[in-house]
Amino acid sequence: MVPPLPRIETTEMPATGSASLPDADPSTDADHDPFAGFAPALDAVREIAGAYLAGLPERPVSRAATLAEMERALDGPLPETGTDPAAALREWFERAEAGIVASPGPRFFGFVNGGSFPAALAGDWLASALDQNLVAWASSPAGAQTETVVIRWLLDLFGLPPGWDGTLTTGATMANLVGLAAARQWAGERMGFDPAADGLSGNPRIPVLVSEVTHASVRKALATLGLGRTATIEIPAPGGVMDPVGVRDALARLDGPAIVVAGLGEVNTGETDDLTAIADARDDHPHGVWLHVDGAFGLFAALSPRTAGLVAGVERADSVATDGHKWLNVPYDCGVALLRDGASARAAFAAGGAYLAPGTDEGPAPSGLGPDMSRRMRALPVWCALRAAGRDGYREMVERCLDHAAGFAAWVEATPDLEVLAPTRMIIVCFRVAPPGLDATTTDALNRRIVAAIQAGGRAFVSGTVWDRKAAIRAAFDNWATRPADVAILQAAILDGVRRQS
Ligand SMILES: Cc1ncc(COP(=O)(O)O)c(C=O)c1O
């Protein structure tokens, strides 16, 4: 039981100054409770969301609504007059429903999405209701400390050193940005300038080594930070794995500090870089290297003895990005930036303002390590998910996802006319349909048609991609709720697609 808070006797509050309060506005007079609207609005969301969530296992997983359909359903002039909040909510859902994708459901294997544990969703709703602003300690001591605690819990979950810093972001793209902003700050200071204060213009270029298959979000972050989307030193990645000797050779050609970006979980295949070999190359570079690791989903491989070896060496990184809204199964949006030492990130994102000056006896400002100032309490859904599932629950979920991926990959290998295009190391299976006798162009076109047909069919959702210059299909198994029966439906949808499109 939560003990009741002491009651604040509002009638006894002293009026400030000599002026008395103005006459009450009739719309906010004592008889009108401005908070009375919450209960019916929240009842409505509970009813709509409850029905949606209960229907997820059976709901068509994708609705291929067209732009014209969505425009017809949703476009319209700004309403001149208002309506009841619950009615507004119901109206939106009815208008938009044809375009809602059941991506949190158990048969969505596209991209790398994940779903939402019940505790995580509930925590997210509560975070919205409490509406805390995690800009400063004083604006939410509970929120700030919760974020500190979930960062500690996540470090523990991943087996990373307990003394690391971290911050929650909107996703792995922003977590990559945090790590790379810290890296930029560290490298600039080593080169004799302060990137955050002085900017990059007129200063020496900071070399950034990336794998040729580095994720688009890394390039987006590099572009945002002025380091250059393509002004990178590209390291070959045969089979999707960055060549550590290539890293070593490229570093040997540099006579100053550098940033190396490695990956845990290539998005098409789940392949991981050899972090131990890359960290060794880093250690041997006499001018210093900041090693950043994009572990958007791959970091979770640390939870299973089957895959823990894939992340060996991650503890030697300077910064690691991962996602909450993927394999952690908390709702969008949530990412995690983890930093061996937060000093460079703090310098990169420092923001002054007399009104933000900390008072005495305050804890850290949760916005200090990232690009936002005002920010929502993303820590609460993460806290609830970790509290409700515990380490055991997460381990068990990771094992289940690995089983689904391994079982599905074995099925692909055993099925005539299907072929796996890369080893399945984790939760992504990259494969294609390749009947004998078809040329490369026809095979590519067939695979694209099959992906489109599966998506339109609504039974399961997979993404198309290109791997090894071949049109391919990829399925990601990181949803907590997927059962073997869902994987069987995916298999049936693929076989149907092959039959109808061949
Ligand atoms: C390896 C990798 N890095 C980064 C990202 C970007 O993550 P987000 O979309 O959460 O920003 C993804 C997304 O799939 C990814 O797979």
Image (cartoon, grey):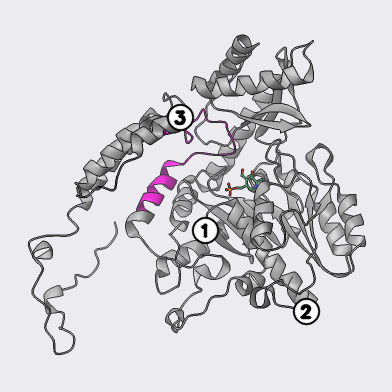
Answer left or right for 373 relative to 266.
left
Asked if 395 appears above or below 357 in the picture, the reply is above
Q: Quadrant of residue 53?
A: top left
Would the CB of label 3 be found within 8 Å of ligand 1?
Answer: no
Residue found at x 53% / y 36%? 479
**Which quadrant of the view contains residue 441?**
top right
Any mark on residue 483, and which? Answer: none
Residue 354, position as x, y percentages in the image: 45, 83
Camera-nearest residue between 149 and 216: 216
Q: Earlier in the sequence, mark 3 or mark 2?
A: 3
Q: Amino acid at mark 1?
A: Val
Q: Judge from the rendering whether residue 157 lies leftward or rightward of residue 282; answer left or right.
A: left
Q: What is the CA distance from the residue labelled 1 to the residue labelled 3?
A: 40 Å
Q: Which residue is mark 3?
A: 66
Label 2 or label 1, whichever comes before in sequence order: 1
For disc 1, the marked residue is 150
Q: Reply yes or no: does residue 348 show up in magenta.
A: no
Q: Quadrant of the N terminus?
A: bottom left
* Left-right relation of 107 to 179: left
Q: Residue at x 67, y 47 (%)?
A: 216
If you read the primary sequence from the N terminus, does the residue marked by circle 1 or circle 3 appear first? 3
Please state which of residues 208 and 51 is positioned toward the viewer in this rendering.
208
CA distance separating discs 2 and 1:
35 Å
Q: Amino acid at mark 3?
A: Thr
Tell me which residue sits at (81%, 37%) in the image. 239
